[in-house]
Amino acid sequence: MVKNVVSVAVILILGVMVWYWFGRTELVFGDEMPDVTLSGKGYELDLIDLKGNYLLVYFWGSWCGPCRQKNPKLAEFYKDIKSGSDYAWADDFEVISIALETRGEAWIRIAEQAGFSWPYQFVEPRFGNHPAYYGFGVNSIPSSFLINREGKIVGANPSLRNIPRMIERLENN
């Protein structure tokens, strides 16, 4: 009897793990961005409300080494686009960062240290309910998605160097 209960428990746990890692749909070029509500520093935002802008949705964590290496580069990229570029679309470009965390507000301190200056900074629990994480089909972090003005995915994990070129092509077509 105990052996059967343990066997069933192990099978259920393995099933949940397989679903967790492989059961989500990854978004690809041309897919609609998911309609999710994000929670930030005392406010909420429906992602769909930013339709009409170019969006870079960036998933990261304060506990993630590769994320912490990328964060200052992303902060510098954003600053360059917003203040030091002559791109016609610069005013319509936004970064939405979503920290996946297990505890506290370490993400706020790490974001400040990296120089995050964009207004859309959010957090989702690393374990539990995280609609953006599942909605975008994120399997690892750091992950990012470039979204066009119509709310369609036009790049998954694009390099920062290529984002301006990608948006310029979209603007010129």
Image (cartoon, helix red, strand yellow):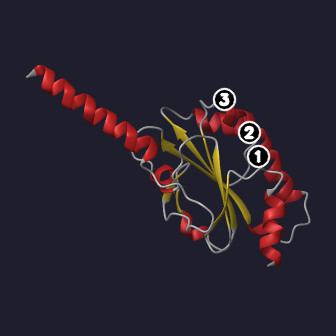
* Image spot of residue 61 (x, y percent): 59, 37
Other residues around mark 3 within 10 Å, as few (<14) / some (14–19) / many (≥20): few
- Residues at marks 3 and 1, CA–CA distance in whole angstroms: 15 Å
Vertical arrangement, residue 168 with respect to residue 104, above or below: below
Identify the mark at residue 70; answer none if there is no mark: 2
Q: How far apart are marks 2 and 3 (CA)?
A: 9 Å
Left-right relation of 11 to 38: left
Going from the N terminus, do you reach mark 3 or mark 1 first? 3
Residue under the point 15% across and 27% down? 5
Q: Residue furthest bottom?
A: 173
Give the residue pinned by disc 3: 65
Where 66 sits versus 90, above or below?
Answer: above
Q: Which residue is drawn at 55% across and 50% down?
A: 40
Residue 8 x/y as whole percent: 19, 31
Q: Which of marks 2 and 3 is nearer the N terminus?
A: 3
- Is residue 89 visible in the rendered image? The answer is no
Mark 2 and mark 1 residues within 8 Å of each other at the beta carbon: yes
Which residue in the rendered view is the most extreme toward the left? 1
Mark 3 vs 1: CB contact within 8 A: no
Residue 75: image x %, image y %?
77, 46
From the viewer's side, name the closer residue of 63 and 113.
63
Kindly identify which residue carries mark 1.
74
Q: Determine the image quadrant of residue 54.
A: bottom right
Q: The N terminus appears in which quarter of the rendering? A: top left
Label 3 residue SS: helix
**What's the amino acid at mark 2?**
Lys
The three-letter code of the residue at mark 3 reads: Gly
* Image quadrant occupied by the C terminus: bottom right
> Could you give the CA–CA distance between mark 2 and mark 1, rounded to whole angstroms?
6 Å
Q: Residue at x 77, y 39 (%)?
A: 72
Disc marking residue 31 = none
Residue under the image location 91 percent in, 57 percent down: 84
